[in-house]
Image (cartoon, rainbow, N blue to C red):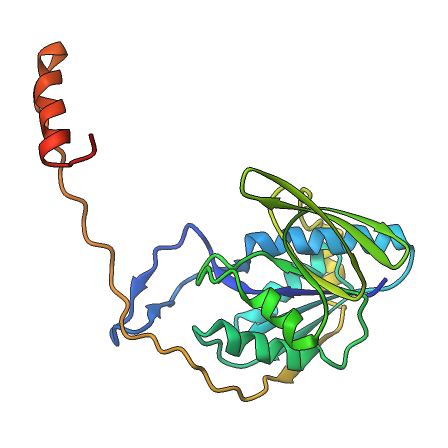
Amino acid sequence: MNILVLMKAVADSEATIKPAADGKSVALEGISWVIGPYDEYAIEEALQQRDASGSGEVVAVSFGGDDVPKVLRNALAMGADRAVHVKGTVSFDPLATARVLAAAVKGMNYDLILCGKQAIDHDHHAVGVMVAELLDIPSVSVVTKIERAGDKLKIEREVEGGVEIVETAMPCLLTCNKGLNEPRYASLKGIMAAKKKPMDEVAAESVASQVEVLSIQSRPPRQGGEIVGTGVEAVPALVKKLREEAKVI
């Protein structure tokens, strides 16, 4: 079973992100780059599906600049067989990103494409399903369980207030959600082996962005709280403020 994993290098969630001097981007100096957390579920699922089928390969694919190879090596250390760096500058436009990725993987041999349901930087929740549409293959999003039966997949996905069960033929694209599995840590053996695994670099197709960032601003500082009193005597004053000022009751 040949599986492609579309993954994104994102800033560590513990990093402090600040607007850059131009006011339209963020300052990324000194930032640590990691695999998108939801993409880790996609990588783990790809490894499990490959092993269960007894054959095939897992190929990690990522679009971006010079920070991507290190993150792809982490995917190789987890167990992916090879990697492809689609080198270029990522824009804020999810459709432009999807077009680049679709063009990069169009000629590859795959039975299944997996990716995280969203990246934690732009949070578009859109690139995966857009890639599927551009490749003209079925897609299912927010997947929490996958069962294979021949050339079809039985899938559980989260919906508001419950779980939806669907079936689709392969090839298809699935976006993975928390709960699908428990991503493994890269072992020392895996880290050493990753250094010898192939990583190809291809130039990203030139795609015009249709979305322009007008400004990026820091979140305004929180205002200090107000103590309206102590004990039960403070309750009437608090209720009055909630009703007349906050207007929440």
114 with respect to 11 (left or right): right
Looking at the image, which residue is at 52% across and 70% down?
Answer: 67
Height in image: 87 above or below 216? below
Residue 201 is situated, as x and y percent measured from the top left of the image, at 66, 81
Is residue 239 in sight in this rendering? yes
Residue with the most extreme top position: 232
In the image, is 126 to the left or to the right of 173?
A: left
Identify the residue shown where x is 20% and y is 30%: 249
- Residue 248 sits in quarter: top left
Residue 207 higher or lower than 126, as above or below: below
Above or below 192: residue 244: above
Q: Decide which of 234, 91 is in the foreground and name it.
A: 234
Tell me where residue 10 appears, x and y as whole percent.
50, 62
Quadrant assignment for the N terminus = bottom right
Residue extending furthest bottom?
206
Q: Position of residue 66 (x, y in %)?
A: 53, 75
Near-viewer residue (5 or 202): 5
Q: Residue at x 56, y 67 (%)?
A: 127
Does residue 65 show up? no
Residue 46 rendering spot, x and y as whole percentages? 75, 56
Based on the displayed image, in which of its 4 quarters is residue 162 positioned? top right
Q: How many marks?
A: 0
